[in-house]
Amino acid sequence: MSSWAGRSAAEIAAAVREKRVTPREVVAEHLARIERLDGRIGAFRKVRAEAALAEADEVAARGELAQLPLAGVPVAVKDNLPVRGEACRIGSAATPEAPAADDHVTVARLRAAGAVVVGLTNVPELCVFATTEGPYGIARNPWDPSRTAGGSSGGSAAAVAAGLVPLALGNDGMGSLRIPAANCGLVTLKPGHAVVPAGIGNGDWFGMSENGPLATTVEDARLMLGVLADTEFARREEPRPRKIAVALRSPVAGVSVSRPYTAAVRQAAGALARSGHQVRRAEPPYPLSLGVTALQHWTAGTARDAADLNRARLARRTRVHAALGRRFEGTVRTGAARDRLRARLTPFFTEYDVLLTPALARRSPKAGPWHERGWLRNVLANSAYSPFTPPWNLTGWPAMSVPAGTLPSGAPCAVQFVGRPGTESVLLDLAAELEELSPWRRTAP
């Protein structure tokens, strides 16, 4: 490992601020690692090598360098958010090739904080599915390249897990941050609604999609979330005991949960109980209709994003998904189903501060050309391994994925924390406790 690639964002920023290393040196080392490793990982659609080095020099010349929270930190951006001067392809041949005139607000905030955008990461077409592949490549899990990195922020997660960048920007409309983070052993937090500016696609999947960080440590996730939200998520010096509900049952009827993921939850629950938290088994009152509600919103969001594109240039699975979603747009637009779900689940979160669940139901599918396979095969594969994430996009409440244990293959396992609106700091504090109680390896070997 080189001296800076593989370090945390907090370590890099501190060294740059103290002038122990220059932004150019940091960025150059990460670019060299990308060139060496990304051919087998497939994290990036576009690497901005020359532009990134020039931007690193600009950061070094800034008068306020000593105050920049992400001074000289290389970051990757999911390729569904505009980056000035680059095309935003969203994993599709149907999207325009014209470069974006301006940065998305979250990208602008990262740059204002001193970060350097080194590249745009691969996504599945229109960010629909929980595997990442398409005309620009296949994003693989660095811990097990035979498996997908997950989706739709799969390229971003793969980039961080492989040590190609310490931080990446992604977003989550049905689990698109938490699924790849869980696969790749990363920390992520899908913030509650309106905590971080969204502006993702054509209407944020009816307000369900949120931008958030992918990081190797809780400290880095907290740091990046603060920049994205333009606020501080300070850790309490003496965390108060929390009432934590532990749920192992899939929210979606008919989906079983494999033993490694339930074991990870039990181990995390035991560690938190020994740390002084009140931990109890309790299943949220998920409605039997949750799977149907999730499918309606998932497809309708895709229909909105595909509305202005040449459908002949979309993959068949995307066309079918969007066609189904057009039937549900009117129903979804009312928000009635989401209101009913929030009303049903709110009393549970009055009794408990935090919900602890598995992050996934089983390991991710094999990496491969899923974009060439049928719609039903994709939907069944996605639903079978990621039933725990969609409820919290439907409610709009914060949820995060945290590494916890390993699978029999040696790849990371993960748990999910969920809280009521405004509890991002609570979730981060619990994740930090778990990180200290059960340290995890930061990047893939």
Image (cartoon, grey):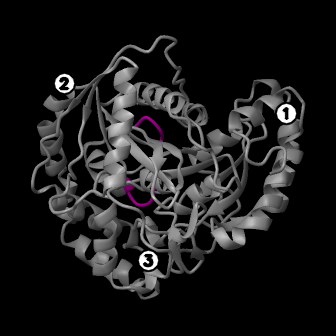
Is residue 335 in view? Answer: yes
Q: Residue furthest front?
A: 408
Q: Which mark is residue 309?
A: 3
Q: Earlier in the sequence, mark 2 or mark 3?
A: 3
Residue bearing mark 2: 350
Residue shown at the point (34%, 76%) measured from the top left: 378
Residue shown at the point (27%, 80%) measured from the top left: 376
Q: Which amino acid does label 2 sit on?
A: Thr
Q: Quadrant of residue 156?
A: bottom right
Disc nearest the viewer among 1 and 2: 2
Residue bearing mark 1: 62
Residue in the foreground of this view, choosing between 167 and 48: 167
Residue shown at the point (53%, 55%) measured from the top left: 184
Q: Calculate the distance from the C-alpha at mark 3 to the C-alpha at mark 1.
A: 41 Å
Residue in the foreground of this view, choosing between 266 and 5: 266
- Could you classify mark 1 by the number of other residues whose Cα lies within 10 Å: few (under 14), some (14-19), or many (20 or more)? few
Q: Does the magenta stretch include residue 30?
A: no
Q: Calculate the distance from the C-alpha at mark 2 to the C-alpha at mark 3.
A: 44 Å
Q: Disc 1 vs disc 2: Cβ atoms closer than 8 Å?
A: no
The picture places residue 25, in percent across and down from the top left corner, at 89, 46
The picture places residue 46, in percent across and down from the top left corner, at 69, 67
Q: What element carries label 2?
A: helix
Residue 87 placement, left or right of 152: right
- Could you classify mark 2 by the number of other residues whose Cα lies within 10 Å: few (under 14), some (14-19), or many (20 or more)? few
Residue 8 placement, left or right of 176: right
